[in-house]
Amino acid sequence: MKFDVIIVGAGPAGAYTAYNLAQAGLDVLILEKEGLPRYKACGGGLTLKIKSLLSDFDLTGIIEDKINQVVFTYDLEQPVKLSFQKPVVFMAMRDELDNFLVEEAKKVGATVMANHEVENVIMFEDEVRVKTEAELFTAKIIIGADGVTSLVADKLNLAKDLEYAVAYEKELKVASDRLVEQRGKINLDYGVVAKGYGWVFPKEDCLSVGVGSYQTGVSLKESLKKYLSGENLIGNEKIKAKGHLLPVGGAKRRLNNHTGLLVGDAAGLVDPLSGEGIFYALKSGKIASQVVIDKLTEGTSLNNYTQLINQEMIPELKKSKLLSKFFFIAPEKIHKLTRKREWLLKELVKTVYGAKSYKELYKTFMSEIPFLDAIINQ
């Protein structure tokens, strides 16, 4: 079977790229190794900048909560409660978000084949061949949206030097009064796990609770157990539990060759400070789709993709990576200072949801906290 573009992976990056390409009239195939919908370990926070990017769609049906309060703690103590007049984050389950975007892509003409795991990718001068267990597909271009352990990245010999954080999350069934208490509020803790943070995110009928860390050798299961205890969540029924890698961004990498490119986690585009991957998956998908459309209609180069990612996304992720050092290397000092200057944490939240840039936030923190230079150089 022949297509203009084959996309491997049906997460936000792959589905949104397919939507944009199919809407432009291209013949697009998504290959997904699992059945759809499928569970993904993810906090499921949809920031305002995501809502803006997805303005074509009505997301009402997949929104499970609207967040207008953020509570920061250090090692489960010294809470700083920030309230916002309007919601800054919207909660969704990843299986529902991903499936929603896949269905939108299908509506505009994309072909989707679930339970089709890609076994091999063979590149030629003017086409790429993609082999699953049962079938062989050909296309002019392949897009790797197959996550942090991307087969496409391996076959295209791209993004082999990714840096990772590791996260471990549980979905918990909790009593209705705890759900009510958590409604409209997320908890973030720096200090409960070395070089990382913990979170509690409310969903419609459960809580997503997890920890993530850059520290090698740390026991995330033990850290999560400590966090659950501190949040009075020990003993609740576990719905799901899963660990996953977070390929953090901030370094310039080659993300394409003459027949393909990488988007989202496969390209190493996760926010080093917040751990957010959905926005960067969607944005890289939007950039990729335009580059591919230009390539197939005007004969331009796929090299434009790497250039645009490096121009439009990497500088912000680089600043986020520098800021992450403040919070992960000296969380107690940072929390002590930001308790006295809560407006700094508000600026952080504004940056994560898209009202400010990381460049602006970095400049603000550097001017307000004199010892940060020393932390960066550690």
Image: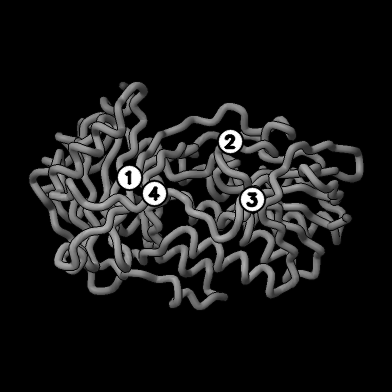
Mark 4–mark 3 distance (CA, rounded to whole Å): 29 Å
Depth order, front residue of 359/349: 349
The correct choice, above or below, for 111 with respect to 238 in the image is: below
Depth order, front residue of 23/236: 236
Asked whether the beta carbons under mark 3 and mark 1 sit within 8 Å of each other, the answer is no
Give coordinates of residue 208: x percent, y percent. Answer: 31, 54
At numbered mark 3, what does the secondary structure look like: helix, strand or loop? Answer: loop
Q: Nearer the viewer, mark 2 or mark 1?
A: 2
The quadrant the N terminus occupies is: bottom right
At numbered mark 2, what does the secondary structure look like: helix, strand or loop? Answer: loop
At numbered mark 4, what does the secondary structure look like: helix, strand or loop? Answer: helix
In the rendered image, which residue does mark 1 sit on? 363
- Counting residues from the start of the chain, the first of labels 4 and 3 encountered is 3
Q: Amino acid at mark 4?
A: Tyr
In the rendered image, which residue does mark 2 sit on? 149
In the rendered image, which residue does mark 4 sit on? 358
Image point (27%, 48%), residue name:
199
Asked whether the beta carbons under mark 2 and mark 4 sit within 8 Å of each other, the answer is no
